[in-house]
Image (cartoon, rainbow, N blue to C red):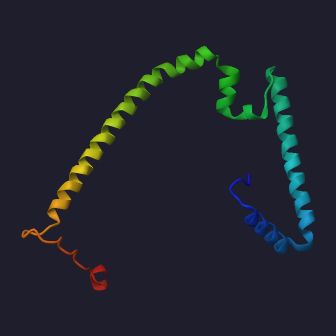
Amino acid sequence: MFENLNWWEIGALLLLALLIFGDRLPAVINDGLRLVRNLRNMARNATGDLSRELGTDIQLEDLHPKAFIRKHLLSEEDEQAIRKPLQGVYDNLRADVTGVHNDLKDVAAAADLRSGSRSTTATGGAPAPAPRTSYDDAT
């Protein structure tokens, strides 16, 4: 949970919590821990009830709808049968998108070459300066 915070940031957060809550900080921490404990117990009770109702062993991770369907309702053959027609469509779509991406890269490279040759003046000198806009032109 705190893998992207270093020790200084965690210390600063603790100091900030101490300044905000003051003497009530231990009570606030205790209330937060009690809330987490109650939520875990509720989730554990819900998984136990579902396990009893369905007759299978359900873990907390299985409560996600995709994981639940994949594990308890579909067999491996059913999942492959569902994926097979969609895999061909996915492969065709990926090939089309790759082709369009390559065509766009070619067009962008060609446009860069043309814009570089147009930026020089007719005498072959330095590129022409960009026109300056004033505040009055923008309003």
Percent across and percent down for residue 22 are 88, 73
Q: Nearer the viewer, residue 68 or 102?
A: 102
**At 25% from the left edge and 45% from the top edge, which residue is drawn?**
106
Q: Is residue 126 left or right of residue 72?
A: left
**At 80% from the left edge and 21% from the top edge, which residue is drawn?**
56
**At 21% from the left edge and 50% from the top edge, which residue is drawn?**
110
Q: Is residue 93 left or right of residue 132?
A: right
Query: Against 114, is 11 above or below?
Result: below
Q: Residue furthest top?
A: 77
Percent across and percent down for residue 83 are 52, 22
Query: Against 78, is 28 above or below?
Result: below
Q: Residue furthest bottom?
A: 136
Query: Against 58, is 11 above or below?
Result: below
Q: Quadrant of the C terminus?
A: bottom left
Q: Residue furthest front?
A: 125
Q: Nearer the viewer, residue 81 or 115?
A: 115
Which quadrant of the view contains residue 64?
top right
Which quadrant of the view contains residue 26?
bottom right
Q: Is residue 132 left or right of residue 85?
A: left
Percent across and percent down for residue 78 are 59, 16
Percent across and percent down for residue 37 are 88, 47
